């Protein structure tokens, strides 16, 4: 599923324009990216959690030349699946999983059309 597919799904499920749904999706994803850049943990119940790990700096050897290369420390994002979603994917559905019925919402006064 692509970002465009997500935007279309949001627009259809809550009854707003695709443009407005795209703005909402960009807002959510941008907020998540900034939180991860700060090193914050993001936990979404029923889906999982995103968090940042640090890979230690290390020295490696080039097998062809024998030269030692120093690789600096790096930060990377990880995702851990929630038990609820894991069980749902494996055929043991639990009540309350994301994706239940959604009420139609009215777009705010500020139109993005």
Image (cartoon, helix red, strand yellow):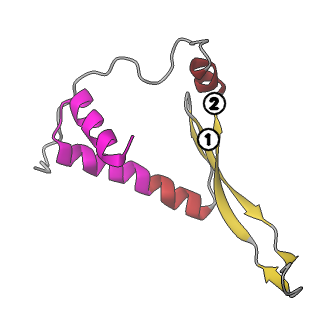
Residue 8: in magenta span: yes
| Foreground of the two, 18 or 111 | 18
| Among the 4 quarters of the image, the one containing residue 62 | bottom right
* Residue 12: percent from left, percent from top: 22, 30
Q: For numbered disc 1, what is the local secondary structure?
A: strand
Q: For numbered disc 2, what is the local secondary structure?
A: loop
Residue that mark 2 sits on: 82
Asked if 81 appears above or below 69 in the picture, the reply is above
Asked if 82 appears above or below 61 in the picture, the reply is above
Q: Which residues are magenta?
A: 1-30
* Residue 40: percent from left, percent from top: 62, 55
Picture residue at 14% right of the left edge, 49% below the top: 110
Earlier sequence position, callout 1 versus callout 2: 1
| Foreground of the two, 69 or 21 | 69
Picture residue at 31% right of the left edge, 22% below the top: 102
Question: Residue farthest to the front?
Answer: 64
Asked if 68 appears above or below 109 in the picture, the reply is below
| Main secondary structure along the magenta-highlighted residues | helix
In the shown orientation, is residue 38 left or right of residue 57? Answer: left
Residue that mark 1 sits on: 49
**Spatial separation of the CA atoms under disc 1 and disc 2:** 7 Å
In the shown orientation, is residue 92 left or right of residue 3? Answer: right
| Among the 4 quarters of the image, the one containing residue 99 | top left
| Foreground of the two, 66 or 12 | 66
Picture residue at 29% right of the left edge, 35% below the top: 10
């Amino acid at each position: 599923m692509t970002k465009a597919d997500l935007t279309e799904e949001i627009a259809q499920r809550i009854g707003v324009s695709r443009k407005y749904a795209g703005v909402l999706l960009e807002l959510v994803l941008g907020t998540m990216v900034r939180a991860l850049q700060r090193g914050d943990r993001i936990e979404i119940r029923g889906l999982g959690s995103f968090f940042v790990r640090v890979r230690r700096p290390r020295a490696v050897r080039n097998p062809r030349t024998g030269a030692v290369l120093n690789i600096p420390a790096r930060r990377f994002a990880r995702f851990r699946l929630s038990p609820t979603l894991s069980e749902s994917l494996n055929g043991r559905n639990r009540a309350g999983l994301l994706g239940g019925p959604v009420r139609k919402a009215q777009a705010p006064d500020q139109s993005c059309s």
